[in-house]
Image: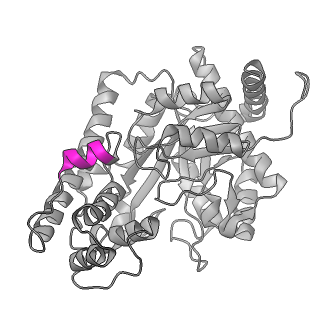
Amino acid sequence: MNGNSSPPYRETNSHIHTPYSFSSFDSMDTIFSMALNENISVLGINDFFVTDGYEAFHNGCLENNIFPLFNIEFIGLLKAEQKKGIRINDPNNPGRVYFCGKGLDFPHNPGLIHKLTLQKIKKESQNQIKVMINKLNGLMESIDKSVTLSYDNVKNKYAKGLVRERHLAKAVRQLAVDNYSTPDEQIRFIEALYGGKKSKFPVDESVFLENEIRSNLLKAGGVAYIEENNNSFPELKKIIKLITSLGGIPCYPVLLDDPSGNLTEFENDAEKLHSALSCIGIGCIELIPGRNDLSVLKDFVSFFDSKGYLITFGSEHNTPELAPLTITARGSVPLDETLKEIAWNGACVIAAHQYLRAHGRQGYVLTDGRLSIEQKEDLTELGKNVIEYYLNKRN
C-alpha cells in the first residue's frame, strides 16, 4: 500500500483487558504476538479502574506497529433502577452498570483529585477481595489447616496490582495442585470447598474449572461471596464526569442478547435505550459481538448507527479462556464488511480525539461535556489519517 491510499477498514479491537486487571493473556507480549498474527491494526486497552498498564501497552504497540487506544472501565450504580429491579448491562444485578471511558489522555496525568478518586475506587474493590479471602481461609481451615491464601501472595503471584475474583479462582485451583499429589485428591479438596457438590471438570481443564470455582464460591450464593459495598459503585453521573475530566469519551458497553435471546430490561427496546442514553449525554456505545447473535447485532448496530452514535467493538478477554483477538459474533461467526467498517470508523474517531487532545486541542467531547456530533465525519477522516500515518511511518 502506498502513502496515497488506505483500505476501507482495518481490523480493530477496541476493548481488551490486560494482566493489569484480569486477562486471558499471561503477559502483554502475548497480546501483541496474537495481534500481529491476526493482522490487528488498532487495539484498545480497557482495564477495570486502573490505567497502570498504559505505559507498557503504549510501548508494546510502538514496538509492534499497532495503534493504541487508551480506555478504562468502571462499575457504577443507577439507584432508581436498582430499586425498581431493572437490570442495565449486568444480567444478575439490577441497577449495576458497567461503563467505559474511551480515548483518555496519554501520557496519563489525572491530577490529585482524580487520582484520589481512582485510588478510592480501587481500594474499595480490594477491600471486598480481602474479605472474600478471609472467608475462603475459614472454609479451607475446616478442611485442611495447612492450606491457606493471602492477599499479598495472590497479588504477587497472579496479578499486576489489582486483584479480581478470577485471580482468587485461579489461586484456589493452584492451591489444590500444589498441596495434593493426585488429581483425585485435588478435586476432592475443591469439591469439599463446594460443600460436597461434584465438580464437572478435572483439574487440568483449568479454564472451565476456574470458571466453576468462581461460580460456586465467589459469586452471589457462593460460600465465600461478599456483597459489594455500594460505596464501591459510584453513581453514573460521577463516573461520566471523571471520564471527561480524564480526557475520555463516555461510552456505554451494551450487553444485548444472551444465548437464549434474552435482553435486560434497560436494553430490550432500542428506542427507549436511545432515549435513556441521550438524556444523559451518551453518544458512544460499545459491543462485545462474541456474546451476540449476528442478526440481532446487525439490527441493533444499524439502528444506533442511524442515530449518529459512535460505535466500537471489542472482545474483553477478561475470562481465563484465550480466544482470538479478531472480532466475531457468537459461535465465531464472521462479521460482515458493513459492521467492520462501522467499528473501524468508531475507532478512528477515538484516534482523532486522542490526537487532538495530545496537541492541546478539543476532541470529540466539548468543554461543557457535550459531544461534537456534527464533527463526527471530519474526525473519522482525521482519525484514519492519523492511524495510517502512524502505521506507515513505522513500516
Q: Is residue 136 above or below residue 259?
A: above
Q: Which residue is more in the foreground, 98 or 197? A: 197
Q: Residue furthest front?
A: 181
Q: Residue at x 59, y 76 (%)?
A: 259
209 left or right of 250 in image: left
19 left or right of 249 in image: left
**x and y, in percent, of residue 92 in the image:** 40, 70
Q: Is residue 9 above or below residue 1?
A: below
Q: Residue furthest top?
A: 360
Q: Residue at x 71, y 35 (%)?
A: 348
Res 282 seen here: no
Q: Main secondary structure of the magenta part?
A: helix
Q: Is 165 colored magenta in this rendering?
A: no
Q: Is residue 119 above or below residue 228?
A: above
Image quadrant containing the N terminus: top right
**x and y, in percent, of residue 321 in the image:** 51, 60
Residue bounds of the magenta highlight:
150-157
Q: Is residue 161 above or below residue 227?
A: above
Say which quarter of the image contains residue 142.
bottom left
**x and y, in percent, of residue 132 in the image:** 20, 60
**x and y, in percent, of residue 365 in the image:** 58, 31
Q: Residue at x 88, y 21 (%)?
A: 3
Count of all numbered marks drawn on residues in the image:
0
Figure colour scheme: one colour
Image quadrant containing the C terminus: top right
Q: Which residue is more in the foreground, 362 or 177? A: 177
Res 188 seen here: yes
